[in-house]
Image (cartoon, rainbow, N blue to C red):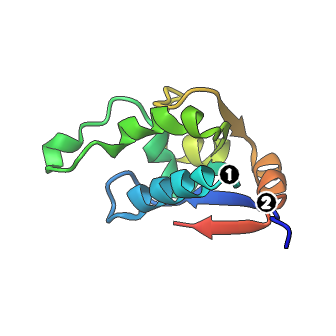
Amino acid sequence: MSHVVKHYAIVNTRASFDALSAKEALDAALILASYEMQVSIYFMADGVYQTQDNQNPELISMKDFIATFKALGFYDIEDINVCKRSLETRNLAQDFSLEDVNVLDKNHFTEKLNQADIVLTF
């Protein structure tokens, strides 16, 4: 029996502290990567809020899981993509809490996303 490595795309569509979706997406990415699966992370729609620096979750009594993004490199998750249009629509700067982020136009974002074997949307 052979072990087939799938390419997973984790798509973040919700704001940082909107329910638990963002935390669940991050947990899923880290778990998949720990099993040596290829993982790419995508931020689009309100999910681009997760990429922003200087968030204050303590103001709403939430735990700061955003700092965990800094661990992505330890899990060899280096393909991080942000939808340029989603940033522009929300008038957000490119002051990311993540390093080495690819800001992609709609066509390139979709093209890269379509390369994944499995897409998990949160």
Q: How many labels does the image show?
A: 2
- From mark 1 to mark 2, how far is it between C-alphas? 8 Å
Give the numbered dot on residue 36: 1
Instruction: State whether residue 4 is above or below residue 44.
Output: below
Are the residues at dot 1 and dot 2 in contact (C-beta closer than 8 Å)?
Answer: yes
Q: Classify 70 as above or below 59.
A: above
Residue at 51% x, 66% y: name it: 122
Q: Which element carries disc 2, helix, strand or loop?
A: loop
86 or 57: nearer the eye?
57
- Name which residue lies at 15% across and 43% down: 59
Q: Can you say which quadrant of the picture contains the N terminus?
A: bottom right
Q: What x and y, as percent, mark residue 55?
A: 31, 36
Which picture quadrant has residue 82?
A: top right
State the image quarter where residue 66 is shown.
top left
Tell me, for residue 5, which label it has, or none.
Answer: 2
* Of 54 and 107, the residue lying toward us: 54
Residue farthest bottom in this picture: 1
> Residue drawn 80% across and 65% down?
3
SS label for mark 1: loop
Number of residues whose C-alpha sits closer than 10 Å to that of mark 1, classed few (under 14), some (14–19) or many (20 or more): few
Q: Residues within 10 Å of mark 2 (few under 14, many from 20)?
A: few
- The answer to which of marks 1 and 2 sits earlier in the sequence is 2
The three-letter code of the residue at mark 2 reads: Val
Q: Is residue 17 visible?
A: yes
